[in-house]
Amino acid sequence: MTTVFYNAIYKDQSGEERIIIENDGKRLKFILRDIAFQGTTFSRMFVEQENKVKEAQDKFTLFFIKEVREENVISATFFCLDAFTLSWDMPLQIVVQNQPLDCRLHVFMKQSYQLREINGPSAKYQLDLWLANAQIGTATGALFRSMLFALQRQLPPGEYIRCCYMCAFSSTYYGNMGPTFGALACFRNSKEKMIEIKKRAEIATYGFEYDDDMATIWDEKVEDVQETYVCAEFQADWSNPYIELQEPS
């Protein structure tokens, strides 16, 4: 996977900082006030070095999550960044008349784990899709994939966002929703099975039959990928009713 960098603006009760987000397609990293943070999703950016936790607690609002393995044994505790906003641009492409065009996705995120509803998401996002100097879509919510779907609905028929979430060989299902970002399952080694499953399902509703079918091949998942990532094996998801492509024979 190719590593990309985003210029970002971070704000909390102590002020505003300009930072650089490093993204290798699976893991996110940035340095903030001399503290290194990392994570696989923006709402769970944790202090990278254990010996820096005390310093981070003095500089930031943190919350902790415990990783529990087998037999309810706590294997690790992560101290994560909280009570902040973050904004940045992500490069994307949309396909228009079979031609990929460079565009950008402006992301504004507000993180508030301690003030969230019980069992609710800790982060809220606003996504704005821009092509050149024109805004062509906007969406708000807590799940990145749901907002990408909302942006796709705003594009003209036949145009689509070129990213993993719009790929025919990626999926998530009700029993394994995962984090708000970065937990899309890739099945690029099971292309024929994915095509058959999506032929039997209404992708817009993700019904129970689709859940059952996905459960049968879940162990064939290659990896978890970010919704905004794209690889050389990308194929637009013809089963998405808002892309309007011809179904494979």
Image (cartoon, rainbow, N blue to C red):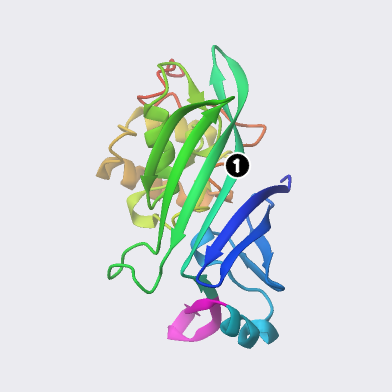
Q: Quadrant of the C terminus?
A: top left
| Residue 32 is one of the magenta-drawn residues | no
Query: Mark 1 belongs to which amino acid?
Result: Met
Q: Residue at x 66, y 58 (%)?
A: 18
Expressed as whole percent of the image width and height from the top left, the position of residue 198 reads: 39, 32
Q: Is residue 214 above or below residue 18?
A: above
The part of the chain drawn in magenta is 60-79
Q: Is residue 36 left or right of residue 132?
A: right
Image quadrant of residue 133? top right
Q: Nearer the viewer, residue 27 or 11?
A: 11
Taking the spot 58% from the left edge, 51% from the top edge, the residue there is: 223
Image coordinates for residue 195, horizontal then vertical, percent:
45, 30
Query: Predominant secondary structure in magenta?
Result: strand
Query: Which one is nearer the viewer's eye here, 202 or 125?
Result: 125
- Whether 19 is drawn above or below 197: the answer is below
Question: Residue 246 in the image: x percent, y percent?
Answer: 43, 15
* Residue linked to disc 1: 90
Residue 78 is inside the magenta segment: yes
Callout 1 secondary element: strand
Q: Closer to the camera, 59 or 80?
A: 59
The residue lying toward the viewer, choosing from 188 and 182, is: 182
